[in-house]
Image (spheres, grey):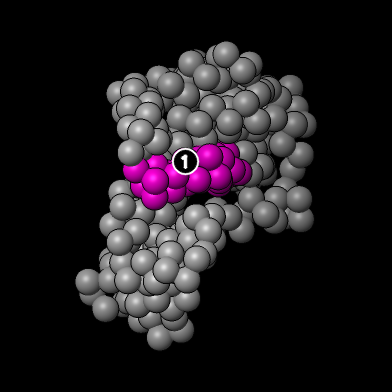
Amino acid sequence: MTSLDAFPARRQSRVWSKLRRNPSALAGAAIVAFFAALALLAPLLPIADPLATSWSAIRKAPSAAHLMGTDEIGRDVLSRMIWGAQASLMAGVISVAIALVTGVPIGLLAGYFGGWTDTVISRFTDALLAMPFLIMAIALAAFLGPSLMNAMIAIGLSAMPVFVRLTRGQVMAVRTEDYVEGARAVGLGHIDIMWRHILPNIVPPLIVQATLTVATAIIAEASLSFLGLGQQAPAPSWGSMLNVAKNFLSQAPWMALWPGAAIFLVVIGFNLLGDGLRDALDPRED
């Protein structure tokens, strides 16, 4: 396989065929698509204002007027759930994008050049990996200040070492392939070789890891919002909704039920999709 043939049309067809035959992957894709559609269409849906309060509808149980009930100051829970999907999914996607943009180039340098470059980067990565992911995210978010953007930056930087390690390992596996040696022989520079010949061949495992990491990032964002370090009130977020709901579990359990169920479902969806992609993109199965 040459670098220009890293993901040919025939292999794409096999990947889609495998995904279509994988019920769990299809279920995961459907769950992710459902929540993504809710987040994207939130401004267009005929739902109540997520910030509108009603002192006559405080902690009302689910009914025809409020399908998921209301919260502690009379806001519609369904509306806040739908708008909260924007914060959670955006946090997951942007955090992983930050991790990819920062981690992949560093891993490329470590795996391609080796030597002292690899030693320095690897030791630094090991030190970061030794710290629990969520603890690092909380520390960075507390340092940067409470906001959704800072939470996404903290989560992305905390996830970066995983992509550094994965990229390094993949690059070391392909840097001695014939097409890479051929590129060196014709005089291509290091950047051209890494960008045009190595990176395209390590994309599949990065896609799988990114999909699985989105689920982790969503949980991290919910955790940071629960602690007051993520999305700030009154903007809706599933984590901040759970933070408020914990005070009313006996009087209004629906306030915690819906955001908790949404986090569970979307995380399950991304994990199922990631597992399906891992099986579909495995070259040993071609």
Quarter-of-image position of residue 160 = top left
Counting labels gives 1
Is 140 positioned to the left or the right of 18 in the image?
Answer: right
* Front position in the image: 122 or 268: 122
Q: Is residue 189 visible?
A: yes
Task: Confirm whether the magenta stretch covers residue 103.
Answer: yes
- Label 1 neighbourhood size at 10 Å, few (<14), some (14-19), many (20+)? many
Rendered residue at 47%/41% (across/down): 106
The quarter in which the C terminus is drawn is bottom left
Q: Which residue is mark 1?
A: 106
The quarter in which the N terminus is drawn is bottom left
* Magenta segment boundaries in residue numbering: 88-114
Identify the amino acid type marked 1. Answer: Ile
Rendered residue at 75%/27% (across/down): 53
The image shows residue 155, relative to residue 172, as above or below, that is above
Residue 223, position in %: x, y?
47, 26
Rendered residue at 65%/30% (across/down): 149
In the rendered image, the residue lying farthest to the bottom is 10
Is 71 positioned to the left or the right of 56 in the image?
Answer: left
The image shows residue 131, relative to residue 43, as above or below, that is above
In the rendered image, the residue lying farthest to the left is 284
Task: Confirm whether the magenta stretch covers residue 13.
Answer: no
Please, what is the dominant secondary structure of the magenta stretch? helix
Task: Tell me the SS state at disc 1.
Answer: helix
* Front position in the image: 1 or 79: 1
Rendered residue at 58%/55% (across/down): 36
Residue 119, position in %: x, y?
33, 32
Residue 126, position in %: x, y?
31, 28
